[in-house]
Image (cartoon, rainbow, N blue to C red):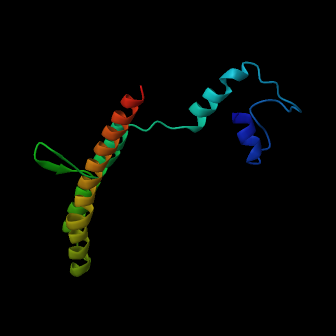
Amino acid sequence: FADIALRSKGADTGVLPEYHCVVLDEAHNVERAATDWLGGRVTRLSFSRLLARLYAVRANKSKGLLVVLENKLAAAAGLDAELVRGLMETIRQQLVPECIHLGEEINGFFAAAVNFLSQQG
C-alpha cells in the first residue's frame, strides 16, 4: 500500500520494482492493514491529554499553552496595551472556560458511549 500511495502522488520510484499487476496474498488481512495504516485511535485519555496541552489545573496551579501565552503577553514589551488586555481577557473569559467545558463534554460523551456499548452486549 505504501508503494501505491507513493506512485499515486507522482513519485518516480516506489517501494517495489515496476509491476503491472498485484497479487494480494493473505488478502484477509487487507482490511486490518488498511485500518492500521489509515486509521487512528480515539480515546478519552487521548482527548484529555490533548486538551490538557491547552489548559489544565494540577495541584491548584494552571498549566498549558494558554497559560504560557498569557504569561508571554503579560511580559511583552512594546505591544499595544489595549490589544494585550483584549487578548488576555479572551483567554481568561472565553478560552479557559471553553477548555473546561469541553473536558466535561468529552467525559460525558465517553461515559455515554461506554453505557451504550455495555447495553448492546
State left or right for residue 82 relative to residue 119. left
| Residue 67 falls in image quadrant | bottom left
Q: Nearer the viewer, residue 12 or 102?
A: 102
Q: Position of residue 119 (x, y in %)?
A: 37, 30
Q: Nearer the viewer, residue 48 or 114?
A: 114
Q: What is the residue that sits farthest to the right in this orientation?
A: 20
State left or right for residue 56 relative to residue 117. left
Vertical placement of 107 versus 120: above or below?
below
Q: Quadrant of the N terminus?
A: top right
State left or right for residue 58 relative to residue 14. left
| Residue 107 falls in image quadrant | top left
Q: Position of residue 11 (x, y in %)?
A: 76, 45
The answer to whether residue 76 of the structure is visible from this angle is: no
Q: Position of residue 109 (x, y in %)?
A: 34, 44
Q: Residue at x 55, y 37 (%)?
A: 39
Vertical placement of 80 versus 97: above or below?
below
Q: Residue at x 25, y 66 (%)?
A: 94
Q: Quadrant of the C terminus?
A: top left
- Tag count: 0
The answer to whether residue 67 of the structure is visible from this angle is: yes
Q: What is the residue that sits farthest to the top in this orientation?
A: 26
Q: What is the residue that sits farthest to the left in this orientation?
A: 60
Q: Residue at x 57, y 31 (%)?
A: 36
Q: Residue at x 20, y 61 (%)?
A: 71
